[in-house]
Amino acid sequence: MSLVYLKSSKYMSDSNGSQINISDGLPFKFTNQFKEPLDINPNSKIEVVSADLKVDDIHDVSLQNDNNAFTYCLGFNGANVGSQRFLQKQARVPDGKYSNNQLANKISDEVTKTNLLDGFNIRVSHDSSTRFKIDVDLEYNRATEEIDNNTYALINSKMGFNESTTQQDTGIGTSAEQITIENQNGLANANVLTKNSTLSVLTSTTSSNGEKPSSLISNVIVPTTHGINNSGGTTSTIMRPIKHLVFPTAYQEPTAGVTFTSVIGATTTNSIAITAEGGGHSLDFKFTAGATTYHAAFVKTKAQWDSYTLPNSVTHGNLPWGHFLILNTSNQAVNTTLASNYCTLLLDTNDYKWKLWNAGTSGLSTFDFFATTNPAFVKTTATLTSLGNWGSGCLGISRGETCITGTNQVATGTNGRYTRTRVFNDSGDSDVGVENSVFCDYVLQIQATEDGTDSYARMNSSEQVTGKVAGDTDWLTLTKQGLVDDLKIKTLLPTITADDNIILVASVSSWLCVKFFIGHDTGGNQQFINLKKLGDSDANNIGDGIALPNRFNEASFPLMPVVAPQNGYVKDEQKTLTIGQYSTKNVSTHSIAKLNAYMNTNWSASETIPTRQPKVSVTNYCNKLTLEDRVVTIESGDFSSVANTTYTIPDGIVKQNEPIRIGADLELLIRMSNLNTTDDEYQNIIDNGFSLEPNRLNTIYQSLGMPKFIFIDEDNPPPTLEFKSTQLPLANGSQNFIVNLENMGKVVGNNSATKSVNKAIAIIPASSLVDDDIQGTKHYSPPYQLPIKLNASTNEKVNNFEIFITTDENKPAVSLLHPTTLVCRITD
């Protein structure tokens, strides 16, 4: 017979007798070694004759025990009882048995799941000195709470002019205008690039003022992974001016040695050489196809283009006049009525072929003309030139439920158009050939003037109709700024030139504080200075902009950037670059839809959070925030060859280590008990507009040793947002323990509860543990001898014991604390 004394320890002694930490010394899983090995044989048995366990508190949490709810809310609701402007989120601790640390961590995890706010966190922890502790973090931490990586995707595509309800419902129109999206997340300063990858090519019979590509908004993109950080994020979009290709006179010079092909009707002619034109009339070259010589003239200036009368009553603005090629079959001056010339071709930069735009007097239905071997060669012979405006596009911010693709909210069936952020292009007036309507909460919209000499920058917003919700017919009312000269970009930005890029900026320092800016660089150098504010929801700080209404509340999260790139006329040249500071919270897990689903799954229908909330009307709120300028780095990637530059967004970030306030005052409510009219905090909670619901029976405050409620406001702020147990936490649970011998013989046990096999040599019921108040442990002595055969296959010498103690649920007994002491007896 041998007696073996086994003990777990966090420490061991080194050769000098000093204690050193050992990371693998766990109280429930440890190994003891002996200098002199023990002899065991096929008849050897082992039994645990005593145990001393130091057991952490066990909390038996369940719906039946009424101790599984942790409710919290951040924000001021005012005296309007039950207004629910701010959500009371009721986190549910899953049923189970938890040690102190496990319970603290699980509450923290569930709060994280339900918390949509950036700049606000609640963390519960436990240690032996302070017991439980609730830390409320209201400081915006840029390093941990924002990222610049994101993934954008289309939410509207190919939207043309006056699309049918079917196209609006699907979000996919009939236009050929398409973009490619490059999420440049591999850059040190990540951003999103778009290019116009497929262009519309019109003929004079299909051209109309409503069909001009740069007057339309055809494609709208939104993030699929992260919304804008709602406590200090920004999104900026750089847009190039609308450009086209202008070709030179004496076109035989840049095309020397290059042959062309014509396809005229059913006849194809190869090996065509471009030759010099003679005889005046401002012609640029001639070529012969078959038996006919064609005399060609480019449109080389805007003044020249404006002198022509166009077919189909089309106006001159917002067309790529440099792409037109006018042909006659004799050496003659171009007829200023284009339809009176032999024919007019238009360059299609999808494949760089001139194609028939107007048949003129020719009667032809087909006339293609292109460089034979490499049609794209002609691009190298032209100069990329600004049309003098920035086309039509936008940067907006919208509530997440209308932007998160793949959800049932963003639908494609009947009336699907009302479920998403969307665009509709309709007839304009004399100021704009096309009226673009972008339905989202806030939108800084760029819209080309009808004459093509400028673009408007309008600060628009949409308001939810009373009694309607997202998805209802006409649930949003779109309010637009008027088309006035003061809103033309060249008026707003007096120093801008036709070759400058513009930048649109949206800044969110809380969902109550939203502002928009516009600016320009110099000749595309991406150095944007002196951004001009166009709108601000802080009515006392609008500058030269307008006061924006409050469109958001906590149920709007996540707040999603909305970008509409412009249409252009040169393939892959009309680019936008979008840069953002986004929430680290992923929209797949953190949205109002997910929060509703969490509440519906974990609680009864009567306890769900409100789906919609009234907007908060507060004044001077944004002034309570401590803001500072944000410096943003532009890393071009494939947008341009410009090296990294920076620009500054005024008051674009909440100052680090400064508290975020949500509402007119800082109001924090944590409820760990149901609310009764006799409670001290009852009137305080009611006076501040917090709803009584959800108000289920709850005693989790006893498990944490906390008061029933934690309530603070700005008028009586505590010295710290750290709250410790004020009484002894109440542990209401217990656990059985199974002692497994991992490395000796072939001990086989069965656990019917978990239908698993183990290596049990003892089962210690919780009811058999006796408190040792002196040692602070629980002592176990078996009521009778129960030796377990080791089932050794041969005689063995053993010099170590590997102990693994589990619960009867076959989980590691993490409630055990050091030291665990076992006395075992080995017999034959």
Image: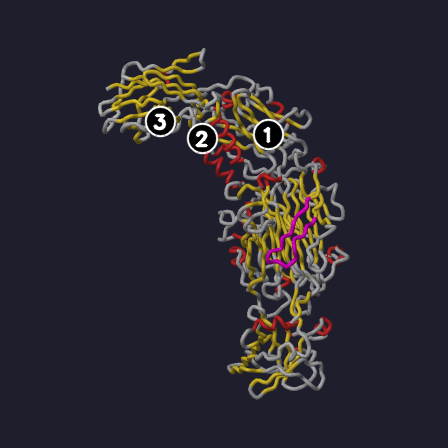
Residue at position x 26%, y 23% from top? 40
Residue 604 in the image, given as x and y percentages of width and height: 46, 32
- Residue 432 part of the magenta-drawn span: no
User: Considering the numbered disc 2 on the image, is that residue within a helix, a strand or a loop?
Assistant: loop
Give the number of the disc on residue 228. Answer: none
Q: Three-letter amino acid code at disc 2? A: Pro
Residue to which mark 1 is pinned:
136
Q: Which mark is residue 94?
A: 2
Q: Total label count?
A: 3
Residue at 63% from the left image edge and 37% from the top image edge:
140
* Nearer mark to the viewer, of 2 and 3: 3
**Residue linked to disc 3:** 802
Residue 584 visible here: yes
Q: Quadrant of the C terminus?
A: top left
Range shown magenta = 630-647
Camera-nearest label, 2 or 1: 1
Q: Hey, what amino acid is under mark 1?
A: Val
Quarter holding residue 656: top right
| Circle 1 Cα neighbour tier, 10 Å, few/some/many (<14 / 14–19 / ≥20) | some
Mark 3 neighbour class, 10 Å CA radius: few under 14, some 14 to 19, many 20 or more? some
